[in-house]
Image (cartoon, rainbow, N blue to C red):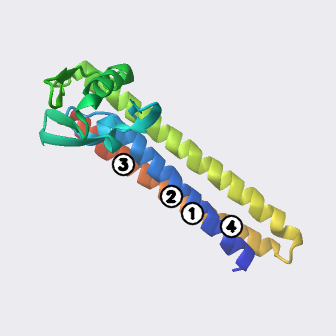
Amino acid sequence: MNDLIKKQLQDAQANMDKAIDHCEAELTKIRAGKASAGMLDGIFVDYYGSATGLSQVASINTPDARTILVQPWEKNMLVPIERAIMEANIGINPQNDGVVIRLVVPPLTEERRRDLVKKVKEEAERGKITIRNIRKDANEKIKKLKGESVSDDEIKTGEGEVQKITDAYIIKVDKHAEAKEKDIMTV
C-alpha cells in the first residue's frame, strides 16, 4: 500500500481514537445511580479569580455507592465549591458540614433510568456521526492523492481500509453505550 494512503489511514485512526475518548468521557458524565468522581468532571470553581477544575482544588472520594465526598485542600474553598456544584445543576444538593462537602446520590426512578438511556443513545449517535465524518474526510483526502502517483486500485484499497477502521470504531461506540445502558438499568 502506498505510504501516502497509510498516512491518511493513521490520521483517521488517531482522530477516531480521540472521538472514542470523547464519547467515553461524555458517557461517564451520565450518572447511573452510583456515585462516581467522574460525575463532578467539568465543574469549575472560582479559585482566586480563575476558573479551576474541582479536582485541582479538592480531593474527591466515593466512600460508598451512594456518596461522594469533596474535601477542599483549603478550608476557605468550601463555599465556592458548594456554589459551583449547585450551579453545575447535576441534580444533587451538596451538604456542607464545615469540613467536607457530602453529595448523596439519590436512587434512580424507572422513568429517570429510561431518560438516561435515551441520553446514552444520543451520545453514542453523536460519537458515530463524528466517526463517520472522519471517514468522509479520510476518503476525500485519499481521493485527492490520485494525481500524486497513486493508482485507482490503491485508492479503492485505501477507502476499503478506512471503511474497515470505521466499522471497528462504530462497534466500540456501541459496546461503550451498551455497557453504560446496562449500568443504568441495573437496580
* As drawn, 79 above or below 37: above
Task: Determine which residue is flagged by label 2.
Answer: 17
Q: Measure the alpha-carbon separation of dots 2 and 3.
A: 13 Å
- Residue 187 shows in this picture: no
- The type of residue carrying mark 3 is His
Task: Determine which residue is flagged by label 3.
Answer: 176
**SS label for mark 1:** helix
Point out which mark residue 8 bears: 4
Q: Nearer the viewer, residue 177 or 83?
A: 83
User: Does the residue at mark 2 contact the one at mark 1 (Cβ under 8 Å)?
Assistant: yes
Local crowd size for mark 2, using a 10 Å CA cut-off: few (<14), some (14–19), many (≥20): some
**First in residue order: circle 4 vs circle 3:** 4
Q: Measure the alpha-carbon separation of dots 3 and 1.
A: 18 Å
The residue at 25%/34% (across/down) is 32
Point out which mark residue 102 bears: none
User: Does the residue at mark 1 contact the one at mark 4 (Cβ under 8 Å)?
Assistant: no
Q: Is residue 94 left or right of residue 134?
A: left
Q: Measure the alpha-carbon separation of dots 4 and 3.
A: 26 Å
- The type of residue carrying mark 2 is Asp
Residue 156: x and y in percent read 73, 68
Residue 140: x and y in percent read 76, 57
Residue 94: x and y in percent read 22, 23
